[in-house]
Image (cartoon, rainbow, N blue to C red):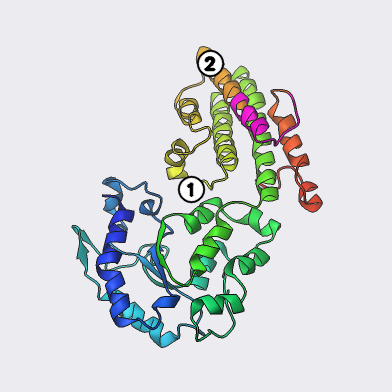
Amino acid sequence: MKGLEIAKLYFEQFGLPMLKEQFPEVLPYLAAGLTGSGSECFGFDDEISRDHDFEPGFCIFLPGEDIVDRRTAFQLERAYAKLPKEFMGLQRAMLQPVGGPRHGVFRTAEYFRDKIGVPATDMRTEEVSPAGPDAAAAEGSSASDALANALTASFWMQLPEYALAETVNGEIFLDNYGEITEIRETLHTWPEDVRLKKLAGHLLLMGQSGQYNYRRCVRHGENAAAQLAVCEFVKSTMEVIFLLNRQYQPYYKWSFRALRALPLLSIEAELLEFLLTTDNEAALAEEKYDVIEGIASDIIDELMEQGLTKANCGDLEKHAYSVNDGIGDPSLRNLHVLAGV
């Protein structure tokens, strides 16, 4: 059974009953789920994953102190700590993993600040209505509006993609207040102009490393440099494919797993792996160059399918500048084409 399934069962059997019995007055303002760091949050965990930082657990998210005060938050932390230490053969760890706790009680604002540098709340700063969270939501500003105002285009371009992936992965089991769901919906993908800027930059790097520099390095007899060009081509190609799918690429050790599951261009994973795992002797180098051109052709076809380029050629560099020309915000469009990478 996958870690996310285990976490959900653990919450349903122990977490939710605890919240209903001990904290009924604040339950309307809580969220719970499993999201963030760890292969189980992406569904990539296996038996090997269980050798570290793998335990039954979940996250409880709290709004600001004006809604759930410090005393109640402390009581929630103690109640969570008393949940069963063993579940389905897994033990809850006594020590926190490197980077801080992955399960337990979190303030929503602090959780997102740790992930992306923006608190993402205090989303609903108005006094909570006696009518409940729905009325409070109507009176205050929404989570998505507050976060959207905080995340400018320049800020979006600086955010690590793996961190963004960790804000929207996993599953939220319960969200009575709606705050976590709103934030995740706001963060679910890049704003379109930012996506295009990043896409343009990575297309240019694909062209430079694969279509131009790889073959030149081989002809110079620089096999190590040729393989570096391959690595740059593969990295940029993967970025392009995730951008074309409007999905964030997770941390590099999971990127190929995630790539194979994408709806668009997942077939390229096998070809990219071939490029990375083969040498650059003359005969094979020509085959690898043909593979590079074939991948480039597939990417260009998808750019045209999505209406992102007006170029009509096989040169990725020209398509990069055409994609950049489609950016609506002139201040972003006029930045260097590589500003998004």
Residue 18 versus residue 47 in the image, above or below: below
Q: Is 34 within the magenta?
A: no
Q: Quadrant of the C terminus?
A: top right
Q: Is residue 252 left or right of residue 203?
A: left
Depth check, mark 1 against mark 2: the one in front is: 1
Q: Which residue has dot 1 on it?
A: 250
Residue 171 seen in this snapshot: yes
Q: Secondary structure at mark 2?
A: helix
Residue 71 percent location from the top left of the image: 40, 87
- Any mark on residue 177, and which? none
Q: Is residue 7 left or right of residue 36?
A: left
Please tell me in which quadrant of the rendered image residue 121 appears: bottom right
Q: Rounded to the nearest whole Å, what is the CA distance between mark 1 and mark 2?
A: 30 Å
Rendered residue at 44%/36% (across/down) = 260
Relative depth, front residue between 339 and 194: 194
Relative depth, front residue between 198 and 192: 192
Which amino acid type corresponds to the residue marked 2 in the rendered image?
Glu
Which amino acid type corresponds to the residue marked 1 in the rendered image?
Pro
Residue 279 percent location from the top left of the image: 48, 22
Q: Is 311 within the magenta?
A: yes
Magenta span: 297-312
Rendered residue at 72%/38% (across/down) = 323
Residue 122 seen in this snapshot: no
- Going from N to C along the chain, the mark reached first, 1 or 2, is 1
Q: Which residue has dot 2 on it?
A: 287
Residue 177 percent location from the top left of the image: 47, 72
Please tell me in which quadrant of the rendered image residue 154 appears: bottom right
